[in-house]
Amino acid sequence: MTAADAVVVGAGVIGASCAVHLARAGLRVIVVDRAAAPGGGSTARATGGFRAQYGTAINVRLSLLAREQLRSFRDDTGVDPGFQPVGYLWLATSAVNLAELRTANALQRREGLDDAVMVGPAELPALNRFIAPAGIVGGAWCPSDGVMRPMEILRGYLEHGARLGVVVRWGEPAIALERGAADRITAVVTTQGRYPAGLVVNAGGAWASPIARLVDVELPVSPLRRQVAITVPTEVLPATMPMTIWDDGFHLRVRDGRVLLLRPTPGDPADPWSDRVDPAWLDDIAACAPVRVPVLRDAPLDWPRAWAGLYEMSPDHHAVLGWATGCPNLLLVNGSSGHGVMHAPALGLLAAEIAVLGGARTLDVHPLRPSRFAEADPVRGSALL
Ligand SMILES: Cc1cc2nc3c(=O)[nH]c(=O)nc-3n(C[C@H](O)[C@H](O)[C@H](O)COP(=O)(O)OP(=O)(O)OC[C@H]3O[C@@H](n4cnc5c(N)ncnc54)[C@H](O)[C@@H]3O)c2cc1C
C-alpha cells in the first residue's frame, strides 16, 4: 500500500502533464496506467498539429498558454517537443464558410493572436503553392501555428516527472475507486495494488467515461475514431509546408519525409471503440488527395501503414476541466475532443491550480466546468474550427 497526495489515472500526455504540474506544486503523485509502456492511448496516434486558430475564446486562450509552455519545454523538461511553427492554412470553398473563418479570425485577434489573418485566393500560392486553386474562395492563415511531436512531449513530462518524484505504475488498470465519507474517493484500486489518495485525477482520454463510472459519475465523453493515411517516402512536398485544411475537414501535413492525410468521418457506428482502418476510407483519400494537391499523384499511399485512434469527444467538443459533480475529490481533465496534445501543457497547469490553489488562476476556466452540460450551458462556437 503506497499513499499519495494525488493519484492520476492515465499516463497519456494529459495525465503526465497533470502529474508534473501537481509534483511541481509539492504533491506526492502516483500515476497508474493499464498499458505496459508509454503510448498505450491516443497520444501515440496523434499526428501532432498545434493551432491557436479556434472559434472560441477559451480554446484560443488554452492554445496561447500551451504555446508559451511549449516554447520553454526543452529548458523545463530537457526534451525537445519538436514544435515547428510551419503555420496552419484554412481553406474555404463557400462564402458561408469564409464568413465563419472571418468571424473566428476576429475573435482570435481580440484574444491576442495578432498574426492570424484572412487571405484571398491571390495570396494562397505564396503560402502553399501545391494546392489546386479550383473552388477556393479564400482562407485564414496563422504562421505561429504548426506541428509538434506528441510522444516527445509525453516523454518530456514522464522524465521530468520522474525527477520530481512522480511514480508511474505501468500495466495497472484502475478497476475500482473506493469511497469514504462525504462521497470522497479514498483509494484507487488496480489489478496490482491499492493506492490511498487525497485526490484522484481522471486522465483516461477516450476511456475517461468508464473510469468516472467506477464512482457513478456520468461523464459525457465518448470515443470517435480518427483515421490517418500516409504516403510512401516522398519529397514532392517540403517539410515546411503548412498544415492545410479544407472546409470539409480534409487536411494534410508532412512528417518525417511522408505526407499524412486525414478526413473526419463519424467513426464506426457498429463499434465506437474500433480503431480499425476502413479500406473504403483509404480509397476515398487516395482519390481525393491528387485532386486537392496534384503533386500527390507521384506519392501513393502506403496502405499497410495507415492507422487509426480515438478522439475523446465531449458534447460541445471542448475540454471538461474541474471537480466531478457528486465526487468532490475527483478532478476531471477530459474531453479535449482531438486537441488534447496541444492543450496538455495548459490543462495540466490549470488542473494543478484547481487542485492546489482551490481554483484556476492563470485562466478563467468557468466555460469548461463539468456541470455545464447539466446546466444546458455548453461552450458555443464555430462547427468549422
Ligand atoms: C488520429 C489522431 C490524430 C490526432 N491528432 C492530434 C493533433 O494533431 N493535435 C492534438 O493536440 N491532438 C491530436 N489528437 C488527439 C490527442 O491524441 C488526444 O486528445 C490526447 O492524446 C489525449 O491525451 P490523454 O492523455 O487524455 O489520452 P491518452 O493518450 O489516450 O491517455 C489515456 C491513458 O489512459 C490509460 N487508461 C485507460 N483506461 C485506464 C484505466 N482503467 N486504468 C488505467 N489507465 C487507463 C490508457 O492506457 C492511456 O495511456 C489526435 C488523436 C488521434 C486519434
Image (cartoon, rainbow, N blue to C red):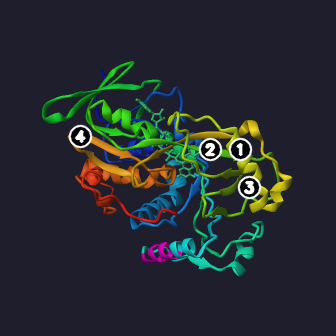
The percent position of residue 69, horizontal first and vertical second, equals 47, 58
Amino acid type indicated by mark 3: Cys
Badge 2 vs badge 1, beta-carbon distance below 8 Å: yes
Q: Which mark is residue 212?
A: none
| 296 on left or right of 331 | right
Q: Earlier in the sequence, mark 1 or mark 4?
A: 1
Secondary structure under badge 4?
A: strand
Residue with the mark numbered 4: 329
Does any atom of ligand 1 lie closer than 8 Å to the CB of label 4?
Answer: no
Q: Residue at x 54, y 29 (%)?
A: 37
Does any atom of ligand 1 lie closer than 8 Å to the CB of label 3?
Answer: no
Q: Dot 3, how many residues are within 10 Å of its Cα: few (below 14), some (14-19), or many (20+)?
A: some
Residue with the mark numbered 2: 227
In the depicted structure, whether residue 10 falls above or below residue 123 = above
- For the magenta stretch, what is the residue range? 102-110
In the depicted structure, whether residue 14 falls above or below residue 169 = below
